[in-house]
Image (spheres, rainbow, N blue to C red):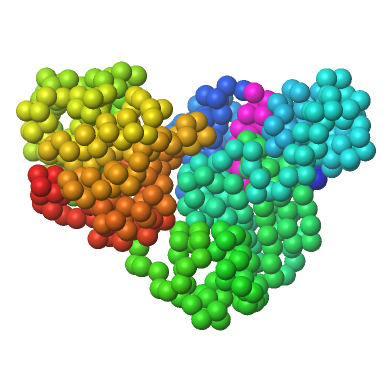
């Protein structure tokens, strides 16, 4: 399905949004062409700067002053001037001719590299996704050198797969960024897995109400983030991003927007249990007609009856209890981290750098911990009444002991016990190590208990029920970790902890000031586990947190 062509305005008619779109489109084509990631980041940062600038960037470019903006170097300034003067960018036009973005994006969707996809397309004599599909249906793929029966079957299977069948999970931060940008650009609403804050996203959807769906689909196809349309129907389309991620667009009539939004948000088991959905213009009207309370998207995984709890909110969080600094593998100093956390409105933040046993990154020994404590004291003098807590992310050793002397651990205000090495150990051995560590009198919280990394490492074999029993016995909390590729504990596991009465810590595991923003992911995951503010330790005042740590 060919994407629409862009109208190219002339000199003086490009506003900041249009200039930003051209830079983003240029970055997308550079990525498809295999350009340096540094160049891609530079153009995308410049696009964001242009979009956020309040004065006319075109006028700055024409006046030779655009390089005064943050992140705009001579190369990008020259391209902005060309856009301001002509409304076009010659390099962008050339890339669109040579890269064939529609075919390359379709290749990524199919799991085929850019060069191979272009070679196959050239052998077939096709230049569009529709023509490629037609050639596959006609059985012409088998005539291409290097394509045997198995490869042909795999390609045809991937061509036929639905938009919900991503080849790999998309992390929720990337899924929400992609779907959110698309929804904002065409006046729609995010739906699918990202709206439910699923930790692994496969169903990426946008819902836009319109009497005339054609205009919406055309606008969708012209977005820089939608490199190709691979399906198009009367009121739906499927676009593919530069990474080969499919996004489904649904365009109901305005009177049915609420119905389609409930259905498109999912999950399937939850929606099926609602029965026949009434036609309504808003979600609230759908739920009212069904005679049940409105349900937060995070809880729409499985059928349930009754009134949902009042879930924890981001604004309930009073501090972050798991952060790293330049003392180990973080990018911010103690003071920089403290200032950033204070500026977020927090009352406290815990510095929890690694210990030596982690090995793959710098770690602290006993002397380092005490010297860091002196630095924290100085920072606290400057930031008071805000408080930086002396903490540590201490490694659990093979025998279940901790990677610092007891007298040093006793000095600390918050201790995260963490398992890094040995994630593949058998269930009994792994569980014994972890529960032994949790029984240490200094332990405050168990970090990322299941050890999984989305798309890279499966959850470990830890017996979570045994861990929750020991958590109740000792008062040790369990973490839901806000790193986008961790989100560990997951929502369903948080719910088990909440049901057992075990307190949750929603942490970012931040390794930079920017990483503090991952609190929204940790809170969303806690919400998926039915956690209220009372279930989350770091919704509490500082004295209550310190009392829990001292227990």
- Judging depth in this view, the residue of 57 and 542 nearest the camera is 542
Query: Could you tell me if residue 9 is visible in this image?
Result: no
Q: Quadrant of residue 317?
A: bottom left
- Judging depth in this view, the residue of 152 and 131 nearest the camera is 152
Q: Quadrant of residue 436?
A: top left
**Residue 187 location, x and y as percent?**
60, 60
Q: Is residue 224 left or right of residue 199?
A: right
**Residue 27 location, x and y as percent?**
61, 32
| Magenta residue span | 14-34
- Judging depth in this view, the residue of 370 and 532 nearest the camera is 532
Magenta region includes residue 32: yes
Q: In this view, does 532 lie to the left or right of 269?
A: left
Which is the main secondary structure of the residues drawn in magenta? helix
Q: Is residue 146 left or right of residue 431?
A: right
Q: Which residue is drawn at 23% across and 42% down?
A: 445
In the image, is residue 495 above or below residue 14?
A: below
Locate the N terminus by quadrant: top right
Q: Residue at x 71, y 48 (%)?
A: 162
**Residue 516 location, x and y as percent?**
33, 42
């Amino acid at each position: 399905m060919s994407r629409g062509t862009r109208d190219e305005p002339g000199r003086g008619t490009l506003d900041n949004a249009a200039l930003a779109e051209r830079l983003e489109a240029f970055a997308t084509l550079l990525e498809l062409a295999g350009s340096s990631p540094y160049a891609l980041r530079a153009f995308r940062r410049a696009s964001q700067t242009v979009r956020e600038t309040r004065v006319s960037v075109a006028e700055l470019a024409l006046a030779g002053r655009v390089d005064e903006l943050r992140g705009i170097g001579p190369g990008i300034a020259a391209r902005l001037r060309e856009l301001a003067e002509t409304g076009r960018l010659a390099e962008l036009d050339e890339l669109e001719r040579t890269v064939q973005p529609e075919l390359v994006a379709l290749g990524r969707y199919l799991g085929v590299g850019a060069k191979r996809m272009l070679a196959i397309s050239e052998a077939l004599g096709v230049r569009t996704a529709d023509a490629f599909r037609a050639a596959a249906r006609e059985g012409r793929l088998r005539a291409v050198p290097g394509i045997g029966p198995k490869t042909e079957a795999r390609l045809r299977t991937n061509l036929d797969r639905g938009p919900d069948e991503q080849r790999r999970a998309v992390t929720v931060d990337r899924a929400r960024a992609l779907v959110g940008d698309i929804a904002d650009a065409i006046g729609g609403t995010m739906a699918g897995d990202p709206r439910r804050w699923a930790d692994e996203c496969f169903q990426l959807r946008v819902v836009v109400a319109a009497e005339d769906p054609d205009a919406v689909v055309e606008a969708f196809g012209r977005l820089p983030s939608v490199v190709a349309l691979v399906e198009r129907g009367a009121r739906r389309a499927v676009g593919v991003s530069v990474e080969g991620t499919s996004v489904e667009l649904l365009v109901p009539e305005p009177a049915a927007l609420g119905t389609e939004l409930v259905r498109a948000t999912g999950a399937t088991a939850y929606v099926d249990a609602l029965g026949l959905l009434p036609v309504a213009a808003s979600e609230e009207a759908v739920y009212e007609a069904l005679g049940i309370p409105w349900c937060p998207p995070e809880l729409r995984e499985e059928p349930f009856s009754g009134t949902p709890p009042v879930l924890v909110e981001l604004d309930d969080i009073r501090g972050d209890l798991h952060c790293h600094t330049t003392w180990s593998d973080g990018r911010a100093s103690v003071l920089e981290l403290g200032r950033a956390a204070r500026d977020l409105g927090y009352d406290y933040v815990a510095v929890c750098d690694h210990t030596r046993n982690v090995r793959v990154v710098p770690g602290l020994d006993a002397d380092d911990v005490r010297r860091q404590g002196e630095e924290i004291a100085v920072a606290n003098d400057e930031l008071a009444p805000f408080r930086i807590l002396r903490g540590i992310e201490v490694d659990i050793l093979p025998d279940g002991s901790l990677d610092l002397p007891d007298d040093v651990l006793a000095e600390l205000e918050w201790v995260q016990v963490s398992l890094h090495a040995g994630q593949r150990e058998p269930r009994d051995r792994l569980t014994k190590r972890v529960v032994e560590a949790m029984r240490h009198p200094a332990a405050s919280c168990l970090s990322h208990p299941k050890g999984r990394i989305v798309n890279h490492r499966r959850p470990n074999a830890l017996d979570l029920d045994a861990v929750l029993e020991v958590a109740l016995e000792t008062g040790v909390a369990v973490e839901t970790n806000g790193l986008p590729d961790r989100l560990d504990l997951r929502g369903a596991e948080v719910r088990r902890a909440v049901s057992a009465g075990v307190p949750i810590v929603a942490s970012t595991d931040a390794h930079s000031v920017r990483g503090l923003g991952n609190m929204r992911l940790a809170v969303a995951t806690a919400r998926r586990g039915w956690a209220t503010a009372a279930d989350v330790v770091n919704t509490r005042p500082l004295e209550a947190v310190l009392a829990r740590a001292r227990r």
